[in-house]
């Protein structure tokens, strides 16, 4: 829900897109129209000056109306042939000349119109007008997605599968053009424009009442910062998710409200530490963020303990090094300009040079990470390191999507694809907000708890992830439970099957949220009451079955008490089996 922020709400002034389109057409067609009008005026005026003859041979002059009428059907090529009297030779000569002039004038006008239609500025104005109209007519809640590169496209398909609508802004035409190629269930309006311009966000629907959030995913941290700032100032309280790899930009973003900042470099090290100490917890997390239908990932080779060698000491290398040291692992860094870092072994030089890499003593290392911003360099470093020590645990950073087959061929143990990592985290946050809270808290419960949760999920859901959904146990959303909810319902009773209450629904409660406090993976004997929120995962049919229990009093009566009650009002009165009253 949108909450008011600390800033005074303002509006974005925008020019009228329709007037700009009309103005462009008129400006391009000004000269051709003037030429056409002049030719027409001269032709009419000349025809009134040249005398003709009536049937008796008397000289007559054509009036302006008759001349205008004649030139109208001649210039428009209709050619009725209706004239007051047969033309004289002089009249025919003048008409012949005006016909050729008119043809030239029309050719000039039509050519100018076609050129105007192909004009880039006109097409952009027309596209902007069409885009603006589409956004204005949207009635369903939508997300404003800024940046439609690899991360945006991955997230877009995940949102579309969830039935969420979105509006896209990107500064590259080829990115927006992919909206026409990609198969979406609903129309996705796209605009090619600079998102760093607040007017662009206004046109894209930032002030639209149906806009439920902004997601900034461009590759430019400054642009993402401007988007977060604009959203905070124009729509205080509107949820904002922004991607950045810079701690400084993240700090500046947080100065404007409380946006959700996604830093894939941070997550790589965090996940590595989680996999190092609790591999089952990491497996559970990576399965849940993949979305419905994802197969349970196979347990991969766990990260090795011992000394690690990190090539590249930029933003990614620094964050990863800090995470490795936090896990009590020794780190050796290779970089062209590593600088001084207390407690670290620093090697200055190009890691692709064999003599420099040899200084890292890979034979005694446990892990190796190629973390530069160049894919070719990272691939060559991985090959060289593996040749030096085949037992090394290998990590690498893939910067460009086109390099994916090459990294896959090298069978990297721990690959960072920033776009995929950001898309999965944002999806987890958007799909079910409670899921992200569950993922943040579940790592504290240890390896055994995570392994047991995985076993339960496999037992109830199988090897493919089913829907993850949230239910609110309120009188409005669970009217069928009203008679029992205030006194409390055992979670195990709530999850009985509506078709046979002796059976349990294929669902695993992941989290119970009550008054801001959470209970992770609550047991069946836990009592739920009014106002509680549940996060569950189950098979495809389970959400519908649980919804029947929550909304249908007759179904709830059978599920919770075992008492069969007729569905119809008359049958209930005749049989005397009346549903339990909330009183």
Image (cartoon, helix red, strand yellow):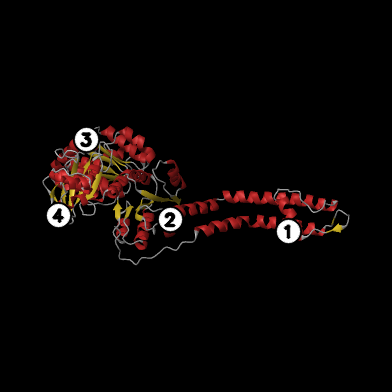
Q: Are marks 3 and 4 in contact (CB under 8 Å)?
A: no
Q: Nearer the viewer, residue 36 or 111?
A: 36
The CA distance from mark 3 to mark 4 is 34 Å
Question: Hey, which residue is sitting farthest right in the picture?
Answer: 57
Q: Is residue 66 above or below residue 542?
A: below
Residue 309 position in % (x across, y down): 25, 42
Residue 301 position in % (x across, y down): 22, 35
Mark seen at residue 462: 3
Q: Earlier in the sequence, mark 2 or mark 4?
A: 2
Residue mark closest to the camera, 3 vs 2 = 2
The CA distance from mark 3 to mark 2 is 44 Å
Please identify the quadrant where the C terminus is shown: bottom left
Mark seen at residue 136: 2
Mark seen at residue 486: 4
The CA distance from mark 1 to mark 3 is 83 Å
Q: Secondary structure at mark 3?
A: loop
Q: Is residue 560 visible?
A: yes
Q: Earlier in the sequence, mark 2 or mark 1?
A: 1
Q: Earlier in the sequence, mark 1 or mark 3?
A: 1
Residue mark closest to the camera, 2 vs 4 = 4
Residue mark closest to the camera, 3 vs 4 = 4
The CA distance from mark 4 to mark 1 is 87 Å
Q: Are marks 1 and 3 in contact (CB under 8 Å)?
A: no
Q: Secondary structure at mark 1?
A: helix
Q: Secondary structure at mark 2?
A: helix
Q: Earlier in the sequence, mark 3 or mark 4?
A: 3
- Give the residue drawn at x 55%, y 53%: 122
- Give the residue drawn at x 18%, y 36%: 459
Residue 196 position in % (x across, y down): 41, 57
Mark seen at residue 41: 1
Is 418 on the left or on the right of 183, as rendered? Answer: left
């Amino acid at each position: 829900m949108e909450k008011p922020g600390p800033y005074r709400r303002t509006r974005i002034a925008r020019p009228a897109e329709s007037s700009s389109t009309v103005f462009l057409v008129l400006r391009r067609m000004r000269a051709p129209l003037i030429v056409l009008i002049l030719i027409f005026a001269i032709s009419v005026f000349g025809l009134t000056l040249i005398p003709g003859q009536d049937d008796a041979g008397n000289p007559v002059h054509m009036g302006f109306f008759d001349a205008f009428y004649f030139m109208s059907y001649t210039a428009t090529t209709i050619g009725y042939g209706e004239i007051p009297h047969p033309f004289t030779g002089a009249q025919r000569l003048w008409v012949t000349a005006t016909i050729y002039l008119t043809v030239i004038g029309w050719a000039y006008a039509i050519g100018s119109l076609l050129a105007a239609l192909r004009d880039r500025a006109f097409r952009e104005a027309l596209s902007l007008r069409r885009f603006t109209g589409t956004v204005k007519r949207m009635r369903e809640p939508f997300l404003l997605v800024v940046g439609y590169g690899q991360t945006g496209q991955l997230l877009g398909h995940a949102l579309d599968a969830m039935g969420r609508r979105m509006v896209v802004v990107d500064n590259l035409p080829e990115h927006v053009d992919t909206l026409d190629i990609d198969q979406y269930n609903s129309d996705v309006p796209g605009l090619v424009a600079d998102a760093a311009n607040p007017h662009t966000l206004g046109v894209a629907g930032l002030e639209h009442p149906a806009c439920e959030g902004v997601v900034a995913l461009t590759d430019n941290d400054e642009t993402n910062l401007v988007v977060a700032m604009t959203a905070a100032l124009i729509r205080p309280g509107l949820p904002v998710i922004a991607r950045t790899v810079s701690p400084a930009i993240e700090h500046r973003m947080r100065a404007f409200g409380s946006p959700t900042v996604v830093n894939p470099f941070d997550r790589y090290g965090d996940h590595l530490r989680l996999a190092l100490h609790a591999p089952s917890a990491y497996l559970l997390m990576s399965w849940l963020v993949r979305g419905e239908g994802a197969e349970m990932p196979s347990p991969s080779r766990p990260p090795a303990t011992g000394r690690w060698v990190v090539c590249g000491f930029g933003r990614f290398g620094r964050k990863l090094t800090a995470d490795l040291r936090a896990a009590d692992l020794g780190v050796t860094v290779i970089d062209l300009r590593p600088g001084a870092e207390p407690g670290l072994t620093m090697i200055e030089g190009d890691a692709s040079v064999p003599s420099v890499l040899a200084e890292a003593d890979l034979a005694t290392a446990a892990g190796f990470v190629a973390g530069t911003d160049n894919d070719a360099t990272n691939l060559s470093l991985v090959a060289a390191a593996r040749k030096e020590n085949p037992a090394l645990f290998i990590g690498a950073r893939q910067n460009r999507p086109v390099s994916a087959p090459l990294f896959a061929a090298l069978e990297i143990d721990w690959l960072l694809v920033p776009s995929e990592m950001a898309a999965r985290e944002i999806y987890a946050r958007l799909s079910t907000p409670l899921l992200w809270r569950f993922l943040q808290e579940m790592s504290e419960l240890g390896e055994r708890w995570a392994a047991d949760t995985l076993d339960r999920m496999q037992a109830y859901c199988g090897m493919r992830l089913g829907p993850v959904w949230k239910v609110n146990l309120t009188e409005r959303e669970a009217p069928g439970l009203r008679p029992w909810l205030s006194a409390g319902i055992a979670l195990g009773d709530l999850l009985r099957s509506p078709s046979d209450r002796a059976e349990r629904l294929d669902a695993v409660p992941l989290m119970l949220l009550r008054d801001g406090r959470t209970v992770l993976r609550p047991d069946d004997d836990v009592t739920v009451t009014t106002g509680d929120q549940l996060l569950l995962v189950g098979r495809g049919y389970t959400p519908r079955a649980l919804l029947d229990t929550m909304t249908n009093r007759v179904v709830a009566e059978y599920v919770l008490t075992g008492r069969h009650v007729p569905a119809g009002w008359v049958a209930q009165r005749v049989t005397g089996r009346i549903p339990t009253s909330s009183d």
